Amino acid sequence: MKQPIIAILFLALTGLCFRTAEDDQQKDKGSFYATVDGKMFKVREDQLFRGILVSKSASMDGRTPSRTVISTTFNGATYDKADKTPFTESVAFEMSYEESKLGPPAIFSIALQVNSTDYSMVKETSKIKITDFVWEADHKHFHLSADFDCQMRSWGYPSDNKKDVNLKGHMTNIRITVPSWLAGKTQAPAAR
């Protein structure tokens, strides 16, 4: 009688150990949710919720200095437009990298491609707020979460007669890679 009980307990504990590892992987998995004028933006099923730290050169006119930005793109459906050219719906973010800083980034831009139209944000009525910033132990990656609420305007405005749209949502636990050539220029905080 004791042997079956011990075997059952062993199997139960083994199953819990595997489930815990699986739960940890799920916890670290990123997510992205957005609506365009209240309608859900559907990301592709094979979407990886990742980004990269990128070094941007200064502008030729000197108005924009060189800077390091967080860059990430979320892709949606791909289809042919009316003129038979392929079109992939997407939401792309660039935000200035400020070590472990929460709140609004100093500089950011958002681009939207949806319903066969390219949109860029209207700066005065758009906002993004970083809500979480956590370094991985290797200091080669960090996880980023942010909320955004933006007015987006078509590239052909006003001649294309497209109205502005509202892009609203959040990204959670997006894994951002710090390339090795850039890692020396950034300072990750000491492990907590």
Image (cartoon, rainbow, N blue to C red):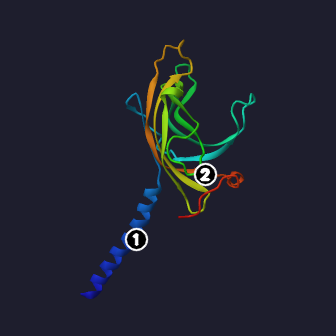
Q: Residues within 10 Å of mark 2 (few under 14, many from 20)?
A: some
Hey, which residue is sitting farthest top in the picture?
159
Left or right of 8 in this view: 71: right
Q: Residues within 10 Å of mark 1 (few under 14, many from 20)?
A: few
Identify the residue position indicated by label 1 in the image.
Answer: 17
Q: Closer to the N terminus: mark 2 or mark 1?
A: 1
For the residue pair 165 and 190, the one nearer the viewer reads as 190
**Residue 64 position in % (x across, y down):** 68, 33
* In front: label 2 or label 1: 2
For the residue pair 176 and 84, the one nearer the viewer reads as 176
Residue drawn at the location 37% of the way across and 30% of the way down: 38
**Residue 83 position in % (x across, y down):** 56, 19
Indicate the secondary structure of the residue bearing disc 2: strand
Hey, which residue is sitting farthest left in the picture?
1
**Residue 55 position in % (x across, y down):** 68, 43
Label 2 is placed on what type of residue? Answer: Thr
As drawn, 122 above or below 32: above
Asked where in the image residue 183 lies, by quadrant, the reply is bottom right
Indicate the secondary structure of the residue bearing disc 1: helix
**Residue 182 position in % (x across, y down):** 69, 51
- Residue 80 visible in rendering: no
For the residue pair 74 and 175, the one nearer the viewer reads as 175
Residue drawn at the location 59% of the way across and 50% of the way down: 99
Tag shown at residue 162: none
Left or right of 172 in this view: 64: right
Identify the residue position indicated by label 2 in the image.
Answer: 177
Label 1 is placed on what type of residue? Answer: Cys
Residue drawn at the location 63% of the way across and 47% of the way down: 53
The residues bearing labels 2 and 1 have C-alpha atoms spaced at a distance of 29 Å
Residue drawn at the location 58% of the way across and 24% of the way down: 85
Left or right of 6 in this view: 186: right
Quadrant where the N terminus sits is bottom left
